[in-house]
């Protein structure tokens, strides 16, 4: 057997071995169960808290004289959260439906279109803020933060119990 043929055969055997172990690993992989309603409520509560922290960080950055362009990580996260937000409210995650207390009112599910419309307002507001980061529009950044706060308050007014 020539050296070249030996190398080719060794490479072929190595490829088969790698594929076999990959296929075996895929077969032996354990599936992860979907999250429970309780886990979803806890996840959305944590996400809302992180959203509030992010919003506060943006306000702090503007008070400290930072440029809008330095806030892209935070505004990008807010855009992602705004788009994911409705998925955190599947049926079965309302008041009394899990052992976890929730401030989500049943109106979320009975008036889903309005809930989605309010989220669309939030998406538009945070997307505009993210665009201000891209254009470094520091002058209008703080006023856009207040627009975002207004969209949050409008949703909380109709869909969240008072603290």
Image: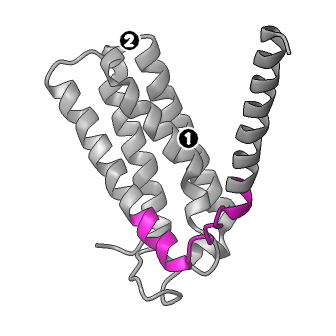
Assign a secondary structure to mark 1. helix
Q: How is the image coloured?
A: one colour
Residue closer to the observer: 27 or 131: 27
> Relative to 109, is 49 above or below?
above
| Residue occupying the point 40% across, 75% down | 103
Residue 27 screen position, x and y as percent: 74, 60
| Residue occupying the point 16% across, 27% down | 63
- Circle 2 residue: 136
Is residue 122 among what the camera can see?
no
Where the C terminus falls, by quadrant? Answer: bottom left
> What is the spatial separation of the Cα atoms under label 1 and label 2, in whole angstroms?
19 Å
Classed neighbour count for the residue bearing mark 2: other residues with Cα under 10 Å, few (<14), some (14–19), many (≥20): some
| Residue occupying the point 72% across, 32% down | 14
Quadrant of the image occupied by residue 153 = bottom left
- Residue 123's disc is 1
Quadrant of the image occupied by residue 74 = top left
Is residue 85 among what the camera can see?
yes
> Relative to 94, is 121 above or below?
above
Residue 59 screen position, x and y as percent: 24, 34
> Relative to 24, is 162 above or below?
below
């Amino acid at each position: 057997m020539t050296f070249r043929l030996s190398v080719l055969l060794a490479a072929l055997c190595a490829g088969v071995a790698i594929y076999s172990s990959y296929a075996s690993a895929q077969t032996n992989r354990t599936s992860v169960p979907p999250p429970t309603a309780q886990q979803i409520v806890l996840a959305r509560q944590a996400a809302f808290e992180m959203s509030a922290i992010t919003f506060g960080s943006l306000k702090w950055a503007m008070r400290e004289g930072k440029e809008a362009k330095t806030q892209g990580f935070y505004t990008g996260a807010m855009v992602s959260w705004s788009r994911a937000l409705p998925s955190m409210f599947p049926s079965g995650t309302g008041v009394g439906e899990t052992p976890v207390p929730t401030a989500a009112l049943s109106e979320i599910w009975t008036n889903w279109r309005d809930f989605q419309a309010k989220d669309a307002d939030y998406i538009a507001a945070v997307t505009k803020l993210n665009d201000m980061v891209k254009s470094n529009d520091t002058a209008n950044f703080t006023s856009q933060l207040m627009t975002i706060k207004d969209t949050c308050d409008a949703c909380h007014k109709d869909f969240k119990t008072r603290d």
